[in-house]
Image: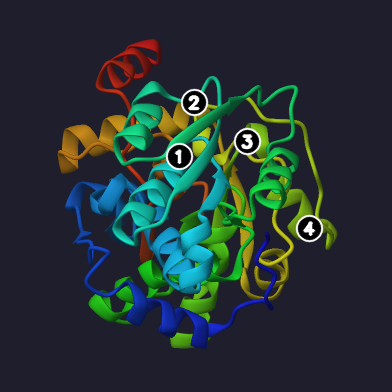
């Protein structure tokens, strides 16, 4: 079965913060004088690569599953994901005593697939270029009586993701701008809900890969635009459209959506390794790349950056950096 509730608001973010307290990590906020000099701004990096399962996705997955009834959890959950939401649902389900079936593309990063299995998820693979994961997930949920927990188009998932921005603003105080990665829209939608409720004058910017700018097209046209599966290093943002629950939030509360190319994502990965000594996956670099390399208008501002995740094979990091040398 599919959960269908109304579009979330900030009260849902507050409820999510209470629900995930003690289960999710309150991740650190990092700063760098070199990053500030490069960008001409004061940057505050919310390091969700230090979150459980290595990405912000744990927040929304845990919140959504914890909000289910005992009967719903007993019947299990199903989701589809290229990796981080897969791991998040698998771990959250294990913690909450719930069986989880995860539909993953056959070409998902091996490190993410292995971690999902390690957390106890049952994986079913599909061809992302020929099959529709939403259709597979919906059919499986209806057949087995499970609850579908989509990676971004779900009110409780969106609310859970918004807790990262809430924590960031509570830690660093007033910001002029908050920049978040954009794939399906769960993180950006939740970020906008929290940021605008706490500080109505803040600018919220979403960042997509150049090859997959369906969100930017949707934002500018006023309707959800669907594209073919994009080919980008940002595997967590290889989505084809925004969700029905997050698009209204993004339309109302987000100030702009920009894009960055794969080369800049690799440059940002190298920067994080060399300067902050942390591992960030390409998708996790979207917001940072926009701030560091002059794509978002950050000069002279106090700017929050969501680092969304750090799940990447170590050998892959070397290959990517070497390819751009």
Q: CA distance from mark 2 to mark 1?
A: 14 Å
Q: Earlier in the sequence, mark 4 or mark 1?
A: 4
Q: Mark 1 and mark 4 in contact (Cβ < 8 Å)?
A: no
In this rendering, position of residue 188 left or right of residue 132: left
Nearer to me, 114 or 122: 122
Identify the residue under disc 3.
Answer: 210
Query: Where on the picture, by quarter, is residue 206?
Result: bottom right
Mark 4 surroundings within 10 Å by alpha-carbon count, few (fewer than 14), some (14 through 19), many (20 or more): some
Foreground label between 2 and 1:
2
**Looking at the image, which residue is at 52% across and 47% down?**
295
Give the mark toward the camera: 2 or 4: 2
SS at mark 4 in the image: helix
Q: Which residue position is annotated with label 1?
A: 283
Q: CA distance from mark 2 to mark 4?
A: 30 Å
In this rendering, the label closer to the viewer, 2 or 3: 2
Q: Which mark is residue 108?
A: 2
Label 4 belongs to which residue? Answer: 220
């Amino acid at each position: 079965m599919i959960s269908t509730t109304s579009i979330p608001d900030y009260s849902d973010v507050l409820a999510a913060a209470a629900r995930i307290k003690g289960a999710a990590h309150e991740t650190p906020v990092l700063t760098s004088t070199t990053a500030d000099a490069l960008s001409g701004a004061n940057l505050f990096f919310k390091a969700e690569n230090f979150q459980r399962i290595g990405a912000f996705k744990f927040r929304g997955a845990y919140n959504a599953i914890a909000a289910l009834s005992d009967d719903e959890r007993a019947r299990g959950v199903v989701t589809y994901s290229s990796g981080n939401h897969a791991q998040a649902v698998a771990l959250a389900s294990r913690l909450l005593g719930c069986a989880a079936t995860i539909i993953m593309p056959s070409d998902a990063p091996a490190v993410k697939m292995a971690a999902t299995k390690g957390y106890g998820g049952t994986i079913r693979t599909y061809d992302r270029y020929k099959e529709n994961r939403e259709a597979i997930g919906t059919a499986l949920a209806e057949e087995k009586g499970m609850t579908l927990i989509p990676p971004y188009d779900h009110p409780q998932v969106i609310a859970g993701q918004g807790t990262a921005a809430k924590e960031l603003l509570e830690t660093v105080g007033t910001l002029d701008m908050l920049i978040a990665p954009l794939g399906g829209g769960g993180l950006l939608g939740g970020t906008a809900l929290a940021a605008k409720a706490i500080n109505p004058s803040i600018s919220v910017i979403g960042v997509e890969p150049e090859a997959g700018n369906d969100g930017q097209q949707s934002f500018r046209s006023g309707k959800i635009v669907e594209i073919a599966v994009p080919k980008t290093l940002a595997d967590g943002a290889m989505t084809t459209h925004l969700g029905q629950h997050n698009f209204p939030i993004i339309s109302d509360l987000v100030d702009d959506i920009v894009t960055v190319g794969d080369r800049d994502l690799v440059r940002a990965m190298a920067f994080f390794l060399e300067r902050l000594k942390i591992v960030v996956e390409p998708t996790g670099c979207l917001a940072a790349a926009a701030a560091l390399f002059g794509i978002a208008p950050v000069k002279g501002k106090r700017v929050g950056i969501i680092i969304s995740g750090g799940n990447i094979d170590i050998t892959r990091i070397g290959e990517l950096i070497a390819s751009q040398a």
